[in-house]
Amino acid sequence: MLSAMPDKFSSFKEFYPYYLKEHKNRTSRRLHVVGSLLVLAIIATAIITGSWMLLWLVPFVGYGFAWVGHFFFEKNKPATFKHPLYSLMGDWVMLKDVLTGRLPW
């Protein structure tokens, strides 16, 4: 069942706990982390090689891994649909939290 998402948040600080609640499933979090790390790898490869066409892959890889996590494991709707900026910020903060051990991998 897809969960209801609040329409408004007054700040990212208010949004992030909601974001984490929507990423409780470990497999979904792992897919988000893998997608984010692949995005960084694609960007780095594009910069190092000058192959700027690789950047077309970034949204497909980033969203692809995340949306598989949401639709098949979390069974909820990605926050990107209503809160694209906060959701993008949440992806990177969650990656940092996983890499620093604050959230379980």
Image (spheres, helix red, strand yellow):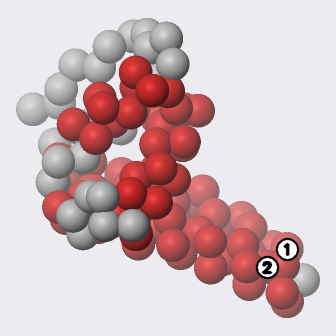
Residue 18 screen position, x and y as percent: 29, 29
Residue at image point 45% right, 26% down: 13
Left or right, 105 with respect to 16, comes to left
Residue at image point 46% right, 42% down: 90
Figure quadrant of the C terminus: bottom left
Relative to residue 28, is residue 42 depicted above or below? below
Residue at image point 22% right, 19% down: 4
Residue 79 screen position, x and y as percent: 39, 32
Left or right, 55 with respect to 31, comes to right
Residues tagged 2 and 1 counted as in contact (Cβ below 8 A):
yes
Residue situated in front as seen by the camera: 89 or 77: 89
Q: Residue furthest left?
A: 1
Query: Sequence-wise, which precedes: disc 2 or disc 1?
Result: 2
Relative to residue 17, is residue 10 depicted above or below? above
Residue 76 quadrant: top left
Residue situated in front as seen by the camera: 1 or 102: 102
Q: Residue furthest bottom?
A: 49
Residue 74 screen position, x and y as percent: 17, 47
Identified by mark 2, the residue type is Ala
Q: Is residue 60 visible?
A: yes
Query: What residue does disc 2 label?
Result: 46
Identified by mark 1, the residue type is Trp
**Mark 2 surroundings: few (<14), some (14-19) or many (≥20) residues within 10 A:** some
Residue at image point 62% right, 71% down: 40
Left or right, 66 with respect to 71, comes to right
Q: For numbered disc 1, what is the local secondary structure?
A: helix
Figure quadrant of the N terminus: top left
Q: For numbered disc 2, what is the local secondary structure?
A: helix
Residue 52 is marked as: 1
Q: Is residue 51 visible?
A: no
Residue 21 is marked as: none
